[in-house]
Amino acid sequence: MAQSLELLLIQFLMPDNDARRQAEDQIKRLAKDPQVVPALVQHLRTAKTPNVRQLAAVLLRKKITGHWAKLAPQVKQLVKQSLIESITMEHSPPVRRASANVVSIVAKYAVPAGEWPDLLPFLFQCSQSPQEDHREVALILFSSLTETIGSTFRPHFADLQALLLKCLQDETSNRVRVAALKAVGSFLEFTNDGAEVVKFREFIPSILNVSRQCLSAGEEDVAIIAFEIFDELIESPAPLLGNSVKSIVQFSLEVSSNQNLESNTRHQAIQIISWLAKYKANSLKKQKLVTSILQVMCPLLAESSNEDEDDDLAPDRAAAEVIDTMAMNLSKHVFPLVFEFASVSSQNANPKFREASVTALGIVSEGCAELMKDKLEPVLQIVLGALRDPEQMVRGAASFALGQFAEHLQPEIISHYASVLPCILAALEDVSDEVKEKSYYALAAFCEDMGMEILPFLDPLMGKLLAALQNSSRNLQETCMSAIGSVAAAAEQAFIPYAERVLEMMKVFMVLTNDEDLRARARATELVGIVAMSVGRARIEQILPAFVEAAISGFGLEFSELREYTHGFFSNVAEIMADGFVKYLPHVVPLAFSSCNLDDGSAVDIDESDDENINGFGEVSSDDEAHDEPRVRNISIRTGVLDEKAAATQALGLFAQHTKSSFAPYLEESLKILERHSGYFHEDVRLQAIIALKHILTAAHAIFQCQNDGSVKAKEVLDMVMNIYIKTMTEDDDREVVANACMSIADIIKDYGYMALEPYMSRLVDATLTLLREESACQQLENGSDIDDEDDTEHDEILMDAVSDLLPAFAKSMGYHFAPIFAKLFEPLMKFAKASRPPQDRTMVVACLAEVAQDMGAPIASYIDRLMPLVLKELASPSATNRRNAAFCAGELAKNGGETTLKCYNDILRGLYPLFGESEPDDAVRDNAAGAVARMIMVHPQSIPLNQVLPVFLRVLPLKEDHEESMAVYNCVSMLVLSSNPQILSHVPELVNIFAQVLVSPAETPEVKAQVGGAFSHLLSVYGQEMQPLLSNLPPAHANALAAFVPNS
């Protein structure tokens, strides 16, 4: 065989295609015989030309897997010996590397079986050889062997690390340094052990030196390995050393800003900054690197993309991702710098910089929302100015930024509608389709939360939108439909005059079947659901079946986005129709099940780069290649499937919520799906499962309450739901998912009471404690930060608000029995009230304490000395929300704190007094101040100087905004009147006026009105005819309201 094989190898390398094909066929036939292995080994060692030796090695690598087990021991020994010789004695680098690849494959089988004990000692010896070639090939082998027999290296890890560090610093050979860099990358990719990863931190200076040398030599593909290594180090939970972070950032910024480098190289460098911002944000802050990063990233937004390059690699897009990540994690450090960049760049003569200025503001609007709200006026000035820019790119970026503001700066942005909406309306007439499309997006986002403020703009808006819907490209029509949906949601019943025409137009879109039209069909399906919600069941019920039928038929078109929007449509219809939706359940629930059970569609790219494919060598394939395990390079999930699953999961919950006991046939399967999805790998699906579980629980109770063993079955469902929620609280790594689990638990406690929840209380309290201590999985994203910052305030406000809502829910269900549990939770809660914490944290604590005091009652007295200084300080806060919550809390502490609070009465009254004056701009704050004073009077009237307090108190009545305070306030006034308190009776004219306004107010409850009416009757009984002049001066509606309470004579 050896002789014929040599001829075939030579023939295979000929330029004649026919000769090559014949040789390939013959080689394939011979390769089925195990004897091909020693024959190829012989040619690897003895063939005269390097090309033939290299081809022999490539073929050997491909064939040896299938034949190794069948070879005799002496042949195996020959193979191993020949490979070692080839590596050490071969002069041709390509042949050496091809032989090293064969060693890697043989070692995979021989080393674990104990058949090659001298391989590792040989490699260590080789790596310290005075010959550069030997050192290089040893390192190449260490790299490739990591993938096949990495675990064998574990006992030698310390020696290997020392060796790699030495080779990285090899002063005589760049090739050795590069091979060492690649080997470090392989080892880091292999090891998951944090302790092992930590040891690589000291490699960072050497890695940076090698990478800089590679970049200077034009070897960008090698330099990129450094970024892969940094990626592994950053994602490791082990902390990076401070100086290392600084040097990695400096190197990454050098590469990012170097326009002479390839896009991919620069993208990798920018990506490292992004990972650092995500995983090591504290390190960036402590090393004072935020400014230097943004000074590079913000100008990158103005860099023109090369038309030939992949958009995803464009530096401006990658820089945008970094700025967004930094805004999310380091908002207070990021916003001032971005705002300064935007202010200066908005005046730049270069339109790319003007575009970058508004793009930057749009990007940070989510992460820096609270800071931007305080600067909304100057920020809007920049963006609205850009909307009138002569350059299309600047106007388009401004429209995008406005859409982002509308999404993230609620509700403050809405108060600027008078200046914003006319600008957006003008932009809808732009000559550029791109600007129009982004303006429709901005309009859609802006209108969604507007409410009645939209009414003056409704007619011109709908005129423009309906015209655009008829005369625009598909892309514009889609965005236009989204905008109409937002307008309909804001206008509600005022949308009725436009509904019929919109629905008629949607019929045309909902029967489109061409692939390019299906996104428009999806938008139309969504819009019909939104319009139905706005106009209500009575107007939609008759025409609904045709739309439902069209929506169901769309499921057969195999377009994930259409299915996603269709689930949303069914969800809206279920909400409008309630029990009327039951008839649709048999048609729509199976569709939701189908989407929930879809395959995730993982797309996996396989890296076959070590098949050298030189001169067509890689074309020789064999069946036994299935035994090779190529490296997985990239895993990506089709996000369309995720969105569809999330929408279907949400739909199941809403179907259950609105059809209750009629959902019985689908309960069991839905529970299985939701249990599975609550542990799904992607947070969007988990979030919808967590929300849906509460609705399913409600339906289960309705289903089982009429059954004999219903209580047992209902308890099983409650068990499942609560176990999932408690596990989610501490183990889920997404804050929004955890927040929703907490909110759902609070709702369940309110709905089912303490007795139903008692079996879970111990675990619930432990989980709450974990969250208050910020020790849950979702709070550990940067547990590797270098310095533990006790007062670090970067956390998720929504999450902690949800956690703090659990305490009042416990208190409401347990009353004074909550006291021992509250004692455990008190100190971790108070950590959020420190002066170093942001105002949102402090008011969260104050609001929580107020509600706990309200329902726990007397046990709050033992905390008064700790709480009162905080509450008094918050009464003077610059934030209206903080003052409002502090006033409410002061009242509840006074009401429930007993004698302990008495000593604080003067301080509380002094703190509340400014809230009654003209300088207080917020009605809700004033209402809560009135509520606090009312509670104080009710508990200890003798301790209040009524002659001084009542004139101030009555002057702010009736209540203007927070009518939850009505019962406390008017109960107090009524008590003083009914007890004929002389201080209150000196204010009869004011009282009559206040009572009349309360009685005609649609915002007040019948109970409050009955209370006030009783007090008015008492005044009549005391003063009789003296009241007549007061009544005759009232408006007729007020006088008539009071007349209803005049006793019959």
Image (spheres, rainbow, N blue to C red):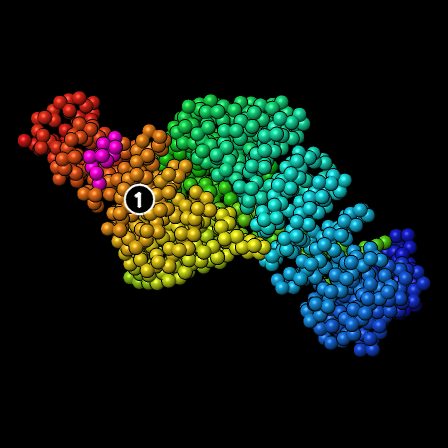
The magenta span reads: 944-955
Residue 121 location (% of width, % of height): 78, 72
Residue type of the residue flagged with mark 1:
Ala
Question: Which residue occupies 17% across, 40% down?
Answer: 975
Residue 1029 within the magenta-colored segment of the rendering: no
Q: Left or right? Give the position of 979 relative to 430.
A: left
Question: Which residue occupies 22% across, 30% down?
Answer: 994
- Front position in the image: 10 or 697: 697
- Please tell me whether residue 537 is drawn above or below residue 133 in the rendered image: above
> For mark 1, what is the residue?
890
Q: Left or right? Give the position of 897 relative to 89.
A: left
Residue 32 location (% of width, % of height): 80, 67
As helix, strand or loop, the secondary structure at mark 1 comes to helix
> Where on the picture, by quarter, is residue 150?
bottom right
Question: Which residue occupies 52% across, 24% down?
Answer: 423
- Front position in the image: 26 or 781: 781
Our reading of the magenta stretch's main secondary structure is: helix
Label 1 CA crowd tier, 10 Å (few <14, some 14–19, many 20+): many
- Please tell me whether residue 903 is drawn above or below residue 713 in the rendered image: above
> Where on the picture, by quarter, is residue 612?
bottom right
Q: Is residue 1024 among what the camera can see?
A: yes
- Please tell me whether residue 907 is drawn above or below residue 452 in the rendered image: below
Residue 364 location (% of width, % of height): 55, 38
Residue 204 location (% of width, % of height): 70, 55
Q: Left or right? Give the position of 330 relative to 253.
A: left
- Front position in the image: 738 or 838: 838
Q: Quadrant of the C terminus?
A: top left
> Where on the picture, by quarter, is residue 492?
top left
Question: Which residue occupies 59% across, 50% down?
Answer: 283
